[in-house]
Each structure stands twice: as C-alpha cells, then as structure tokens.
Amino acid sequence: MNGFSGEPEPKPETGEVAPAAGTVPLPLSQPRFTYILLAINVAVWLAMTAMGGSTNTGTLIRFGAKVNDLIVQGQYWRLLTSIFLHAGIAHLGFNMYALYVLGLEVERLYGHKRFLVLYFMAGLFGSVLSFNFGARISVGASGAIFGLAAALMAFFARHREMFGRHGRQQLLNIAFIIAINLFIGFSLPGIDNLGHLGGLAAGLVLGWYFTPDYQTSWDWSVNQPVLHDRNSLSRQWLVVVIVAGALVASTAFGVTRRQATASTYVQAGQTLIEQENYAEATKALITAVQKDPQSAPTHFLLGYAYSQLKEYDQALVAYQDTVRLEPKMAEAHWNLGLTYLALQRQNEARKEFETFLTLDISDKDAAQARAILRKIGP
C-alpha cells in the first residue's frame, strides 16, 4: 500500500526542521476478525454437512436460513444467521476466498470495530432487502462481502488524489469486479441479487463515513513523519444510529406488508410442518384461517398439524370445515375418517371412508379404504 508524502514540522524546542521523508506508511490494523469470521463460516458449514447436508433445504432452515414466512412469525434472528450459511462447497469456497481477500484489506484500513460494523450491517441490509422484495429461501455471506467491496471503493474514492494513479486504478478495478459479479448474479438463476444490492448500498454509505481521515505529524523520536487516523467509530455514532434505524424500519415495513396476506401464514405453516414443528405450525395456520376462513387447503393443513399433535378434537373441527368448503377433497375425507377412528367414533368414520370411495381416487387408495371398512365392520 502506498503512503503519503510528508513535510517535516519545526521541532518544538529548537525550531529546527528535520530532513524531509519520501513517503509515510499508512497506519494499519493487524487483521483478526476476518480470520474469526472465516473459521465460523467453515465450522457452520461442516456442522450442516454432518447433520443432513448443506444443500438440504430442511437443514438450511434448521440452521437459520432466511425464510420470509418464518421471519414474519417473529424469527428475526434469521436475518443474521443466514449470512453464516452456505449451500454447498462451491458456494462456501467462493465466498470465503472473497472474504479472505477483501476482509483482510478492509480490516487493515478501517480497523477492527469499523470492519465489524461494516460486515454485519452490510449482511443485515442484504437480508432485509431480500426479505422485503424476494420470495426464495436464501443463505450466504455475499451481502456482507459486497459491503466490504463497496467500502474499499469508498476508501479509494475519497483518497483518489492522495494515492494518485494507483488509487484511481484500484477504484476502477473494484468497480469492475462488483459490476461483473452483479452481471453474473442477474444472469444465473437461484442467486439472491437483492442481498447483493442491499449489502452494496450499506457498504457504500458506511464505508464513505468510516473512511480513515489521515493527518500527518512529525515523530521526533524516529525523526520522520507519521500518519494518524482522526476518524473512528465513536465519531460516526450518528451515522451508525441512522443506518441501524433504517434497518429496523425496513424490517418492520416488510413484516407489516407480509402480515396483511393469509398466504404468508399458510407458507409459514407448511414450512413448520416440514420441520415437524407442529405446535408453531398450528399458530401460523390459525392466523391464516382467521384471515381467509374460506380456504379449504388452509383448514386441511391445520387439521393435519393438530392430528400430528394428537389433538384430535381440534383436528376434527378443521377437517370438518375442509370438507364443508371442498366436499370433493378426497384426502380430507380420508383424514377425517382417521380422526373419527382415533376418537373411537366408528359410525362417522365409516361414512367418511364410504364417501372417499365415491371420489376420484387410485385403485391402491380404494383398496386401503375397503380394508379399513372391513376392520370397522357393519
């Protein structure tokens, strides 16, 4: 890294002028947290691999992937945990290489505290933008990494004259790398570009205000000029508060907007059922039913969740509502028949299986229904 040219100041005691020096080295921090973040990401990936596979959707959800419908249910921590998850070795390898290259540079230039705020704020803004306007489950540190790249852009933009041609070339190189990665992201399916854009925007804003403010002074102990960074996290506390407020407000906006639709709670219920978290699934589906009481599939899902909890009385009501709204839903009559059997109400169960046989079902399902009717008896 280039330094700054420095002119000597008069020695306080004598007024003498020390010899001029050519360049002044930048005050750099020794990277520490970049290595810690690398270790955490790799450790989490290994844990996911051992517990179902890092490309398994269920595993990603259990470890904290960004799932919009679960965030609406109050699991806001997913906005943070998702930036430590990676789907597959290629995803992990690419992001960790980028974190190693960019993270070391940003931590050296900005210092430990500003580096951490940049990383996490950019990652969170990426998650929140994806939550607000994206639909898919997403994971990855890409938003945070784009934020680091944007912070480097801000650094060389603010100091482009001091660094001369080298600084301007670095600025162009970083801008080109960001543009190429955005182009690739928009060209390929399955990439969360909203997360990239959110991280990029947060990195640019914070990077601009966090950029070191260098001042030259003369160090008479070594008889040469030295640089001091007059900027710090404490000097930029208002910017941090404003950005954090924007983060909270945008999260609240997304939650409020998504809470207005029953489909959000239906999807949350389905996701929770897949996770076998039936107690939470019933809560989400009850809300969905309240918002759209005429949806037979929602009543059916609620009945299924209750039956898995062995709360058969509640399951019975949900299945009855299902067949009332959709009399030809074969699986609803089947589950309703099973629920009657669990409650030892054989006569009602027989009627449901007989109705089931009149509907459009497969030969295998018909054979199973007849077998159950034989067990119930006349």
Image (tube, rainbow, N blue to C red):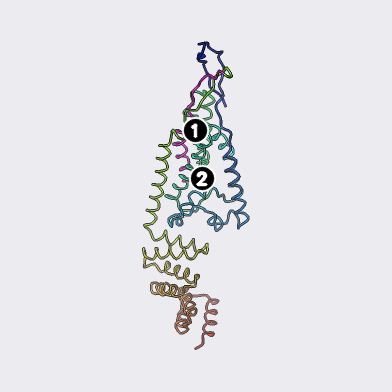
Q: Residue furthest front?
A: 13
Above or below, 271 against 39 in this view is below
Q: Where does the N terminus fall, quadrant-wise? A: top right
Give the class, few, some or many, for how many residues have Cα within 10 Å of label 1's Cα (few <14, many ≥20).
many
* Relative depth, front residue between 18 and 288: 18
Residue 208 belongs to the span the image colors magenta: yes
- Which mark lies nearer to you, 1 or 2? 1
Q: Residue at x 53, y 56 (%)?
A: 61
Q: Amino acid at mark 1?
A: Met
Where does residue 168 sit, x and y in percent of width and height?
51, 27
Q: Is residue 43 above or below residue 210?
A: below
Label 2 Cα neighbours within 10 Å, binned few <14 / some 14-19 / many ≥20:
few
Q: Which residues are magenta?
A: 191-220
The secondary element bearing badge 1 is classed as helix
At 42% from the left edge and 60% from the top edge, which residue is drawn? 265
* Residue 336, placed above or below residue 255: below
Magenta span has 199? yes
Residue that numbered label 1 is attached to: 153
